[in-house]
Amino acid sequence: MLQVAITIKDTAWQALTGDIETTCQDILQQVWAALDVDSQAAWVSMLLAGDGELQALNQQFRGQDKPTNVLSFPSPEAIVAGDDALDVLGDIALSYQTIQREADEQSKNVVHHLTHLLVHGLLHLLGYDHEQDDDAAVMEQLEIDILGQMGLANPYDHPDELA
């Protein structure tokens, strides 16, 4: 079971779906199930913000003074909840404006694009990266496979991301 704590810093997120928190939690639960990871209990925090906040985080942690769609901050820690260990995976931060802009520019359904970015962000928390070509190929294929299990087409081949 993946537990998700969500902080909404930009109210534009509420316009995306009737209940953005439930939408994000449902997406991450589906991704978690598709990954079939060893950990039975894990925790992720999410920040649903805007371009200003993501630009500040991107500058602070990556040295890039521009907004971005998603940032992931993995945590190697685990906290104990009673008798069960709860793996603290880390934090995912997303920018509404960048995600909406990219979806519009690429003629994508914005919720499908958000889903792809949540898959991408969660994979980063689990140690996947795309710094080297070989690693990028592995990560992208895993994204494609997970999205396929969720009924979404390959976002790298299909501009509309519809299955």
Image: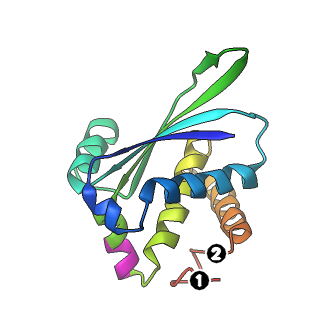
Label 2, label 1: how many angstroms apart (C-alpha)? 6 Å
Q: Amino acid at mark 1?
A: Leu
> Does residue 64 belong to the magenta stretch?
no
On screen, residue 55 versus residue 28, left or right, reads left
Disc 1, SS: loop
Residue 102 visible? yes
Q: Residues within 10 Å of mark 2 (few under 14, many from 20)?
A: many
Q: Which residue lies at the image location 67% right of the left edge and 56% below the top edge?
A: 30
Residues 56 and 37: in front is: 37
Locate residue 161, reporting x and y percent. 56, 79
Locate residue 114, reporting x and y percent. 47, 64
- The numbered dot on residue 38 is none
In the depicted structure, whether residue 21 falls above or below residue 57: below
- The numbered dot on residue 162 is 1
**Which region is colored magenta?**
101-105
Locate residue 41, reporting x and y percent. 69, 33
Q: How many marks?
A: 2
Residue 126 visible? no
Which residue is labeled 2 in the image? 152
In the depicted structure, whether residue 90 falls above or below residue 12: above
Q: Give the position of the N terminus as an image quadrant.
A: top right
Q: Are marks 2 and 1 in contact (CB under 8 Å)?
A: yes
Residues 117 and 45: in front is: 45
Majority SS type along the magenta span: helix
The coloring applied to the image is rainbow
